[in-house]
Amino acid sequence: MTEDIIIQISNKIKEKRKAKGITIQELADKADVSKGLISQIENNRTVPSLLVLINIIRALNLDMNEFFNEIDQHSQQAKVIIKQKSSYQEFEKEPAKGFQYKRVLTKNVKNFPVDIVILELKKGARRSQIVKTDAYEYKYIIKGSVEYLIDNEKYILEEGDSLFFDGRLGHKPANIGEDTAQILVVYFFLDSDK
């Protein structure tokens, strides 16, 4: 099963930008958008409009046809999908120390992308800043103790606890336990035009 097209586009933008040695700020300036928007797009926190996407591709001096030809647009409609642990893909969502993301599966469900990942927070790991995601987020604590700050409210979660919230609320997790915490995360992405 291939990743959802939106996730592939985000990853490709980040990959091409890094390969060309262009900073997020330089790309934002060339595409006439904010640095924050480029960061959100690259980290799968928002979906770019078509105009913004075209401006980014042009700012990277990429051929439009070549960019989209490399995107796998054939989604399999399998009734059962099995993913082996060895096939989970490690990726960087943000430069937060002690945060390790592994993508389990991305699937389009009723035209909405759903992204399932495993997040490991090393002992003492905490995000330095509040983030927002254009998605509803479900978190299940597989192991460890995690504190979530969501919309200025603190929630303490232990192994077996779960949490569901609107990711557009400012949020950040912190590992408050003595060992690595492991969290199953499911992102239900929103339609950015609504």
Image (spheres, grey):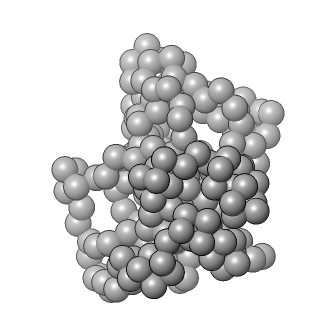
Residue 188: quadrant of the picture: bottom right
Q: Is residue 190 visible?
A: no
Q: Residue at horizontal 60%, vertical 72%?
A: 58
Q: Is residue 92 visible?
A: yes
Residue 121: quadrant of the picture: top left
**With 171 as the anchor, is 93 left or right in this view?**
left
Q: 163 or 26, which lies in front?
A: 26
Q: Residue at horizontal 61%, vertical 65%?
A: 59
**With 49 as the anchor, is 102 left or right in this view?**
left
Q: 29 or 130, which lies in front?
A: 29
Quadrant (top left, top right, bottom left, bottom right) of the C terminus: bottom right
The spot of residue 126 in percent (x, y) is 57, 25
**With 172 as the anchor, is 97 left or right in this view?**
left
Q: 32 or 129, which lies in front?
A: 32
**With 16 as the anchor, is 57 left or right in this view?**
right
Outermost residue toward the right? 152
**Residue 95 in the image: above or below residue 65:** above
Quadrant (top left, top right, bottom left, bottom right) of the N terminus: bottom left
The spot of residue 183 in percent (x, y) is 44, 40
Q: How many marks?
A: 0
Q: Residue at horizontal 55%, vertical 55%?
A: 42
Q: Residue at horizontal 65%, vertical 27%?
A: 128
The spot of residue 184 in percent (x, y) is 43, 46
The spot of residue 153 in percent (x, y) is 77, 33
